[in-house]
Image (cartoon, rainbow, N blue to C red):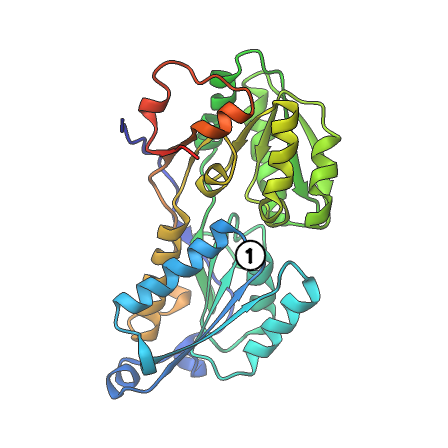
Amino acid sequence: MKSLHKAKLATGLVATALLATACGGGASTDDAASGESVKVGITQYVTHASLDATREGFKQALTDAGYTGDSLVLDEQNAQADAATNTAIAGKFASDGLDLVLAIATPSAQAAVQAVADVPILFTAVTDPVAADLVDSMETPGGNATGTSDGVPDDVVVQQLELIKELNPDAKSIGIVYSSGEVNSEVQVDAVKEAASGLGLEVKEATVSVAGEVQQAAQSLDVDAFYIPTDNNVVSALSSLIQVAESKKILTIAAEGDSVRNGAVATWGIDYEKLGYQTGEMAVKILNGEAEPADMPVETQTTMNLYVNEAAAERMGVELPEGFLEKADVEITE
């Protein structure tokens, strides 16, 4: 089965504030050698599979680099999609004497960058760091923030939508449910609209402000297929959208693999645990005094995997073409 598709992804840089050495934020090689504890704060916007995977990948990279036991103190916080809590966590981290902050997802990264000025910040699962005002440009960082992006290039978005045409050749419309206030999602919707226009697909939108509105928003769309972006509210309430898709027999394509594992039919996507691990490797360089955020490019993944959920296709009444499963890099059967 496994023809591995590789798509080229741009890499760049990210940043926003002060140099770690100038401000005293971040551990040094001498600190690590002396056995002093490194303190890392992790702020995660909401619980869902992709964000959880990045967190675990990040922690594994620290473990593999020897930051274990007494040498590492983690403060893990989750805002559970509450804006006030998200801001409060960032404020707490700003005064906690941390050596490094990891911000998972765009809202958490935005809050951290606004609140934390003298500690290195790494972010992950951020689609467009520039549009989110986390950095001056993708190529030139200028401060204390960098990290990894889960954004995919336009040609991969086209490939994702081509799956709709391959699995439902008669499809004419795509429904997207997304959070109106999330920059990450707005960027993705714009990319989908552009890709859809070249494939003769109409995009219909429904916006939400909280996860509890996802099911009603999905119900409101009369479409031939759903596209699930990496929207934090939508992915955290994925089961409610999948329920609509299954009851109406609507093909559902996702923007990333964990949503396929959890009920969508297919996608070309990245591996979020590996993305988190990459971020952890960047953290190790900062903690060891080998690099500073201002000089570190934002990293991405260049290999896309084809995820296919055969059981989900069955539940949605989608007949997979002959040979389609053989092309999958990751096949889900439950």
Mark 1: amino acid: Thr
- Quadrant of the rendered image containing residue 221: top right
**Looking at the figure, which quarter contains the C terminus?**
top left
- Percent position (x, y) of residue 16? 51, 65
Compared to 13, does 166 lie above or below? Answer: above
- Helix, strand or loop at disc 1? loop
Horizontal and vertical percent for residue 307? 40, 33
Q: Is residue 290 above or below residue 297?
A: below
Task: State how many labels appear.
Answer: 1
Residue at figure coordinates x 44%, y 60% from the top left:
55
Q: Residue at x 41, y 49 (%)?
A: 272
Residue 91 coordinates in the image, percent (x, y):
61, 76
Between 331 and 234, the residue placed more toward the observer is 331
Q: Is residue 106 above or below residue 291?
A: above
Residue 25 is at least partly visible in this image: yes
Q: Position of residue 251 (x, y in %)?
A: 56, 24
Residue in front for this viewpoint, 273 or 219? 219
Residue under label 1? 47
Q: 217 and 287: which one is in front?
A: 217
